[in-house]
Amino acid sequence: MSGVLDHTMMRVEDLDASLDWYTTHLDYEEKGRWEADTFTNVYLGPEDLHEEGAVLELTYNHDDRSYEMGDAWGHIAVRVPEGELESSYQQLMDEGVEDYRDPESCDYNYAFVKDPDGHEVEIVKRDPDQGAKWSLDHTMMRVEDADEALGFWTRKFEYEHTSRWESDSFANYFVKPEGAADEAMAVELTYNYDGRTYDMGDAWGHVAVRADDLHDYWETLMEREAEDYRDPESCDDMYAFTKDPDGHEIEIVEPSD
């Protein structure tokens, strides 16, 4: 399905340690790998990943660089069935995962852990029909203008605003493709009311959107005045990149077997 989110990319400093963390604690398996001269991309997800489910892309650069987390990206969120939040969190604690924000501190609505590189991973309760345990539920990014960010995703990508959570100091808005399966990943847009700005950092890379036809999809984005960041030709006609108003990179990919 064109428009569904395909993956979230994050950069890691020790590929073996990151692979061990995600395969051991979240029961992920390797879905694919791309080896280049200077970097390696590994794609991970649950064994029973839905056809519209998103995977996690770990990018390892071979030059031993380190990364700055920044604060423009927030977290990825993974699903656990209703009633299993506390037991799932305790399982991670028993396995030696960092105790970052336990369910009690989050009013038993969710919890947070961190991977070896410091990327935050939220644990959220979902109906079992909404996807396999530990599958990606959403990726959170912070935005400086909520109206502009919502307009970008609804106009450029034809996403629909599926839910919101507004508090005294911030609001969370969730968007995903119209007609996408419950198992598909969403984007969470977090807007803080205090007018703060954000640092992009480089520990997070991008989210990726699937296109049935890369060039047709790119042409539509250009007609809708999306930013021409890296067009298909500059990427050997394998993918392309645009950016949202806050500078978050969005890859357009045409999946293959």
Image (tube, rainbow, N blue to C red):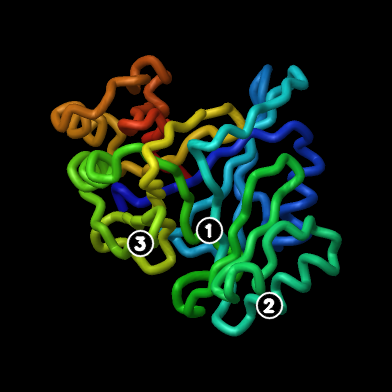
Dot 3 falls on a residue whose secondary structure is strand
Q: Which of marks 3 and 2 is in front?
A: 3
Dot 2 falls on a residue whose secondary structure is helix
Res. 136 mark: 1
* Residue drawn at 47 percent across, 49 percent down: 140
Measured in 3D between alpha carbons, the distance from the residue under mark 3 to the one under mark 2, in whole angstroms, is: 25 Å
Task: Locate residue 186, reporting x and y percent.
Answer: 40, 56
**Drawn side of residue 175 relative to residue 19, left or right:** left
Q: Are marks 3 and 2 in contact (CB under 8 Å)?
A: no
Q: Nearer the viewer, mark 1 or mark 2?
A: 2
Measured in 3D between alpha carbons, the distance from the residue under mark 1 to the one under mark 2, in whole angstroms, is: 18 Å
Q: Is residue 184 above or below residue 149?
A: below
Q: What residue type is labelled 2?
A: Glu
* Residue drawn at 58 percent across, 74 percent down: 107
* Residue drawn at 68 percent across, 61 percent down: 101
* Dot 1 crowding, Cα within 10 Å, few <14, some 14–19, many 20+: many
Q: Nearer the viewer, mark 1 or mark 3?
A: 3
**Drawn side of residue 157 relative to residue 103, left or right:** left
Foreground pick, 202 / 99: 99
